[in-house]
Amino acid sequence: MNLRKKAPSPAPTTGSHNMRSLQVTPVAWVLAGSVTVADAAGAALGYPQLLVVAAAGLLLLVSAIGFVVWRPRVRVGRTFHPKTVTAGEAAVALLEVTNESRWPSAPLTVVDRLGPVDVPLPVRALAPGGSALVRYPLPTQRRGRIPLGPLRVVRSDPFGLLAAQQDHRAREVLWVHPRTWPMSVLPAGVVVDLEGPISETALQGSLTFSSLREYVAGDDRRQIHWRSSARLGTLMVRQHVDTNEPRATVVLDTRAGAWTDDSFEAGVEVAASVARALAMEGHPVLLHVVGEPAPSVREDGAHSVADRLAAAERLPASDPVALLSVLEQSVEGGSLVVVSGRLEASVEARVGAQRRRFAPVTVCNIDPDRPAGCHRRGGIIVVLGPTAPALVEAWNRMVRR
């Protein structure tokens, strides 16, 4: 095929040839059975015509074996660009097949496995030392971690009776990140006033009351909370967070009961949009994906927030314990954004209790049955939307106010 500009040569695979056993198709089994019956009937009944038919069928089987036993000496490699994309963007792969034999190669098929799908790629006959390039699109319609490979060189006879294949271990990964939507930044640690002050304990200046904890040697005695100390029988001190600190914590609720397939994808997009908006402003983002198997995700090559969101999956369980545990174990300070679907009232109240550790606390609910909007409930900000763009628009209106 013609390419406008020269493409980089795909890296060759080494030690990649693994001959597999022959694959016999159903047509071959039918033909073999017919040959046996024709040969037996011709010999028993004295019909030479049946013996000729049996001989012709046997010749076809022998010819098919000759086609697939031949093992082409080819080098196979694949490159693709870009390595990471956003869902819906284009990504293409370039396959290069080189004939390393002194003899011409017959036409063959290279099969590339893209996620769960096998994609056959016909390759023309190659002269000795000749190469062929095949360009093909990669699946980027939905976010995810898309494993590519192995590449398999498949050979079959012209009659479709037998097939054989060689594996070329060209395994790579395409990261398809969730889509993001333009989002205004909600300043971390800044109290958003929708209906009045969220906290009556806010101090003047850049420090805001966060929680109480036991006194330890070296603490400023001016921060001792005497009323609580008298009630609890031990010295308690006020703990504050710096409202100028731009840190933010984003939690993606993955419990199956809170989502449908479509709403979960929208929730991932909202979480990605929040994280991206904060990162673009230089704010550190701590992402927690409920139920995420962190070690295996890292082993799979997920390093960035976008990678981890690309790999996010719904949990089979609906119990809120996993979500609440993540919230309690999160490092306090800055703002907290919880992205969920249909969040139960009791769970929302428990999320609201995090006001003692974060300021502000925002809950983003993707609910297909409720209109977009924003309000304050139980001291937290609740942003609603049936889709990701609708929720983001409600969020942006809230920030502008």
Image (cartoon, grey):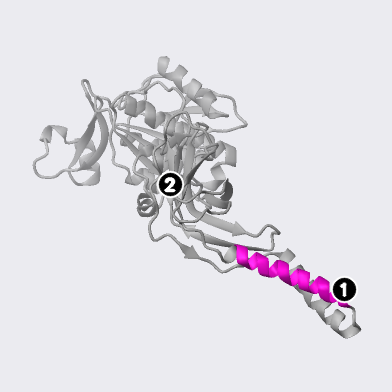
Taken as a whole, is the magenta stretch helix, strand or loop? helix
Q: Residue at x 53, y 23 (%)?
A: 373
Say few, some or many: other residues with alpha carbon within 10 Å of mark 2 (under 14 / 14 to 19 / 20 or more): some
Amino acid type for the residue under numbered disc 1:
Gln
Q: Amino acid at mark 2?
A: Val
Q: Quadrant of residue 309?
A: top left
Q: Which mark is residue 49?
A: 1
Q: Nearer the viewer, residue 129 or 236?
A: 129
Q: Position of residue 11 (x, y in %)?
A: 38, 47
Query: Mark 1 and mark 2 in contact (Cβ < 8 Å)?
Result: no
**Which residue is rendered at x = 40% and y = 20% of the image?**
184
Q: Residue at x 37, y 51 (%)?
A: 294
- Which of the pair 247/147 is nearer the observer? 147
The residue most toward the left is: 218
Q: Is residue 52 magenta?
A: yes
Image quarter hosting the C terminus: top left
- What is the secondary structure assignment of the residue under circle 1? helix
Residue 397, x across and y down, in percent: 46, 17
Q: Taking the image as drawn, is residue 260 in sight?
A: no
300 versus 308 height, above or below = below
Give neighbour class at mark 1: few <14, some 14-19, many 20+ (Cα, 10 Å).
Answer: few
Which residues fall within the magenta stretch? Answer: 48-67
Identified at 38% across, 32% down, the residue is 275
Specify the quadrant of the image occupied by residue 182.
top left
Mark number for residue 249? none
Element assignment for label 2: strand
Which residue lies under the disc numbered 2? 173
